Image (spheres, rainbow, N blue to C red):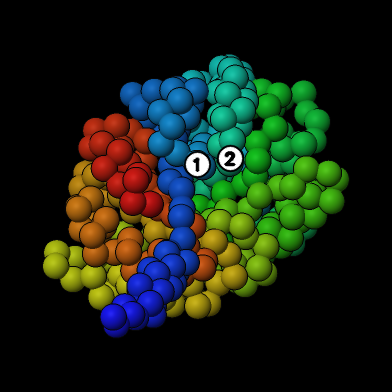
């Protein structure tokens, strides 16, 4: 009686194992703060959809200006009306979600005039949002996990100085996470030098509103080529930053089924894959995008 060869099932098992080992799990990062109709921070984190929340934006700072935070319709910081956001920050953190303050944005008045200016801004952020002390903390007493750099205008210099200064505060005990949202053309003209410091934990690249490196109907090549450039060049956890609906950006929206079937299976092979970033909570509420992709991220 001939013996059945045992090698074939073993080879199949090893190949399946290899396939499983080359696909990395990720999380979803979301921007919250620019639309009063997107729910509270607590409600945002209670959805269970997000692993990271960026509070948007501190959009006035640097060059000797008195910094200002803008949370659109959520609250009025001028009357200390945003201090209650601390409750939401703590609720999110208690669920294991990292909460960052995003500085910059697509509109505002911000720039850094020198390395000294960068250090002054770092000190302000430490004392007013992180582990330092201030009598006028705009979001109250909660200690944020870190700072997100969404730099899209103003000066192109000294963002590396700001990153080094903020990172230096980690020596005081609690780690200060640094994250960034560069545009997909590489290198980013504002953040390229800062990202080369290697100090950024998470980089959610904006693969939208940039035709040369985004998805266009039926064409994933430009997007994937850009993704590969970023993952091979930057020593951080890289996220694919996308609009949560077609209304959330001028161009670059990827239908959820295209993302889950054609794009995520490819980019998840990278050991630097971190997940997907979405702009924004408001648009995600409208579209249900994160719910459609979460199990694949």
Name which residue lies at 78% across and 43% down.
174
Question: Dot 1 corresponds to which residue?
Answer: 51
Point out the tag, 1 or 2, that comes first from the N-terminus.
Answer: 1
| Total numbered circles | 2
Q: Is residue 210 left or right of residue 183?
A: left
Q: Position of residue 88 (x, y in %)?
A: 55, 23
Please say if 60 is above or below 72: below
Name which residue lies at 67% across and 62% down.
199
For this orientation, the residue located farthest to the front is 1
Q: Which mark is residue 34?
A: none
Disc 2 element: strand
Q: Is residue 110 left or right of residue 62?
A: left
Q: Report the quarter where the N terminus lies.
A: bottom left
The answer to whether any part of residue 247 appears in the image is yes
Question: Dot 2 corresponds to which residue?
Answer: 98
For this orientation, the residue located farthest to the right is 172
The answer to whether any part of residue 190 appears in the image is no
Q: Is residue 223 left or right of residue 47?
A: left
Name which residue lies at 52% across and 48% down.
104
Of residues 93 and 142, the one nearer the viewer is: 93
Q: Position of residue 90 (x, y in %)?
A: 62, 25
Q: Position of residue 9 (x, y in %)?
A: 35, 73
CA separation, marks 1 and 2?
7 Å
Name which residue lies at 18% across and 71% down.
219
Q: Residues within 10 Å of mark 1 (few under 14, many from 20)?
A: many
Contact, mark 1 vs mark 2 (Cβ under 8 Å): yes
Disc 1 element: loop
Q: Position of residue 296 (x, y in %)?
A: 33, 51
Of residues 256 and 162, the one nearer the viewer is: 256
């Amino acid at each position: 009686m001939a013996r059945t060869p045992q090698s074939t099932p073993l080879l199949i098992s090893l190949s399946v194992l290899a396939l499983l080992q080359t696909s990395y799990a990720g999380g979803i990062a979301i921007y919250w703060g620019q639309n009063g109709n997107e729910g509270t921070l607590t409600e945002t984190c209670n959805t269970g959809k997000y692993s990271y929340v960026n509070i948007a934006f501190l959009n006035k700072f640097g060059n000797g200006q008195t910094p200002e935070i803008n949370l659109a319709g959520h609250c009025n910081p001028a009357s200390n009306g945003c201090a209650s956001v601390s409750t939401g920050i703590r609720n999110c953190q208690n669920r294991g979600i990292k909460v960052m303050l995003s500085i910059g944005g697509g509109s505002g008045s911000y720039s850094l005039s020198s390395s000294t200016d960068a250090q002054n801004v770092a000190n302000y952020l430490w004392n007013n949002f992180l582990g330092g002390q201030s009598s006028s903390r705009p979001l109250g007493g909660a200690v944020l996990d870190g700072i997100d750099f969404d730099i899209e205008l103003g000066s192109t210099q000294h963002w590396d100085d700001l990153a080094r200064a903020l990172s230096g505060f980690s020596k005081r005990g609690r780690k200060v996470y640094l994250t960034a949202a560069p545009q997909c053309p590489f290198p980013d003209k504002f953040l390229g030098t800062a990202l080369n410091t290697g100090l950024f934990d998470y980089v959610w690249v904006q693969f939208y509103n940039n035709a040369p490196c985004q998805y266009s109907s039926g064409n994933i090549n430009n997007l994937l080529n850009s993704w590969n450039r970023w993952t091979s060049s930057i020593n951080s956890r890289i996220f694919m930053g996308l609009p949560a609906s077609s209304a959330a950006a001028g161009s670059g929206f990827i239908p959820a089924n295209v993302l889950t079937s054609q794009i995520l299976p490819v980019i998840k092979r990278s050991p630097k894959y971190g997940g997907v970033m979405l702009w924004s909570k408001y648009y995600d509420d409208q579209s249900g995008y994160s719910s459609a992709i979460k199990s694949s991220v």
